[in-house]
């Protein structure tokens, strides 16, 4: 493993696990975290959860699983260049979407509305809940008993009210401190990955086209470079070449700007990172281009009428499942019926959030179809 910067997270300055465990043999603590995440049930389910496109709409679109792998790849590249802990970055990247509902943001927003009078629902908190409590794999504890630094990286956003209930992992929100630099850059690796794969999937689906995207500066600039270098390339391969160049530019800019920010502040310890301002970031020019692209995707892809139709269906599925289970908890599987005796609404939210796209559709049919569905 490359030598770490003095302000990077390592085993020497980690706050450790909530429950003591003997150090692993042949791997680091953060490699152990990564391995536990990969072997978790919630991680496997990411294969059948999507963000914009519902899983059954096509096998070529990204899933939450492939997205998480892309974030991990980008994050490790940046971490290595900056002397940060690659294993921690990878663990955060692989776990950051574990709490996502079926049907992406439409599912999350609907479940949050359903939970309005019961504490709300937020996927970052749910991801933390998955690794802290919901996974049932180990004899001695619930969850995965991950290191503090992995858990804080998973929790990207949190209200002050919720932070106050989370103990040590919520303190930074109350104290207005920063997470580790590894957590900061993983958040931006996530942004690089989803913006660019949404461009690729949007073009593949036909919901957006090259002509419209050519008005967006970061895409137009890299498309022109690709066309100049490979004038005879087919459109599909031209798109791939353009997107890979965009990712390359963003990764390089993130490394250079973050390195420049570090040089100005000159942090000497992890404590300096936590007590200072946010250091991971893009240059102002690239940040402006990123915002332009995000705005384009919001207006032209996420609000496309075909996406809106699926969003409406997804909202109905999640809402009606929640209402049916609240009214008649015995419709829940036995293990969730038991949990619902304590906190019915939260148990139902846990059950629905854990569903894949296709399982939610099947469960909806089981409850509301007059046909025999098993």
Image: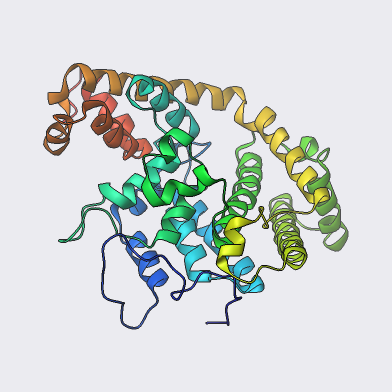
Could you tell me which residue is drawn at 81 percent across and 49 percent down?
284
Q: Position of residue 172 (x, y in %)?
A: 50, 49
Farthest residue, direction right: 228
- Picture quadrant of residue 4: bottom right
Q: Position of residue 119 (x, y in %)?
A: 35, 27
Q: Quadrant of the C terminus?
A: top left
- Picture quadrant of residue 201: top right
Q: Nearer the viewer, residue 275 or 54?
A: 275
Q: Position of residue 57 (x, y in %)?
A: 47, 37
Could you tell me which residue is drawn at 73 percent across and 58 percent down?
241
Q: Nearer the viewer, residue 361 or 118?
A: 118
Q: Is residue 349 visible?
A: yes
Q: Position of residue 322 (x, y in %)?
A: 29, 23
**Figure check: 40 above or below 332:** below
- Picture quadrant of residue 352: top left
Could you tell me which residue is drawn at 45 percent across and 60 percent down?
149
Q: Nearer the viewer, residue 364 or 23?
A: 23
Q: Is residue 355 left or right of residue 267?
A: left
Q: Nearer the viewer, residue 175 or 213?
A: 175
Could you tell me which residue is drawn at 26 percent across and 75 percent down?
22
Q: Is residue 103 visible?
A: no
């Amino acid at each position: 493993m490359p030598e770490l910067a003095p302000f990077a997270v390592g085993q020497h300055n980690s706050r450790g696990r909530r429950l003591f465990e003997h150090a692993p043999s042949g791997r680091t603590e953060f490699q152990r975290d990564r391995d536990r995440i990969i072997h978790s049930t919630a991680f496997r389910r990411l294969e059948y959860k999507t963000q914009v496109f519902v899983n059954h709409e096509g096998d070529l679109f990204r899933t939450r699983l492939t997205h998480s792998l892309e974030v991990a790849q980008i994050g490790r590249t940046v971490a290595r260049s900056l002397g940060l802990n690659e294993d921690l970055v990878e663990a955060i990247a692989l776990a950051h979407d574990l709490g996502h509902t079926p049907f992406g943001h439409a599912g999350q927003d609907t479940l949050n509305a359903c939970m309005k009078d019961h504490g709300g629902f937020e996927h970052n908190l749910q991801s933390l809940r998955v690794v802290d409590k919901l996974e049932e794999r180990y004899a001695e504890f619930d969850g995965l008993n991950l290191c503090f630094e992995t858990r804080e990286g998973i929790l990207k956003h949190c209200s002050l009210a919720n932070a106050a209930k989370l103990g040590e992992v919520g303190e930074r929100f109350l104290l207005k401190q920063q997470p580790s630099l590894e957590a900061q850059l993983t958040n931006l690796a996530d942004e690089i990955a989803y913006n660019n794969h949404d461009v690729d999937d949007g073009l593949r689906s036909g919901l957006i086209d090259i002509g419209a995207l050519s008005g967006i500066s970061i895409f137009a600039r890299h498309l022109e470079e690709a066309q100049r270098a490979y004038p005879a390339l087919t459109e599909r391969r031209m798109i791939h070449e353009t997107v890979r160049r965009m990712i390359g530019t963003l990764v390089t800019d993130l490394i250079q700007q973050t390195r420049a920010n570090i040089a100005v502040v000159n942090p000497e310890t992890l404590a300096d990172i936590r007590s200072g301002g946010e250091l991971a970031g893009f240059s102002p020019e690239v940040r402006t281009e990123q915002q332009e692209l995000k705005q384009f995707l919001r207006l032209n892809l996420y609000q496309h009428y075909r996406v809106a139709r699926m969003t409406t269906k997804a909202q109905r599925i999640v809402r009606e499942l929640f209402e049916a289970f609240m009214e008649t908890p015995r419709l829940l599987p036995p293990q969730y019926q038991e949990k619902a005796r304590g906190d019915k609404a939260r148990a139902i939210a846990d059950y629905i959030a854990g569903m894949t796209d296709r399982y939610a559709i099947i469960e909806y049919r089981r409850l509301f179809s007059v046909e025999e569905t098993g």
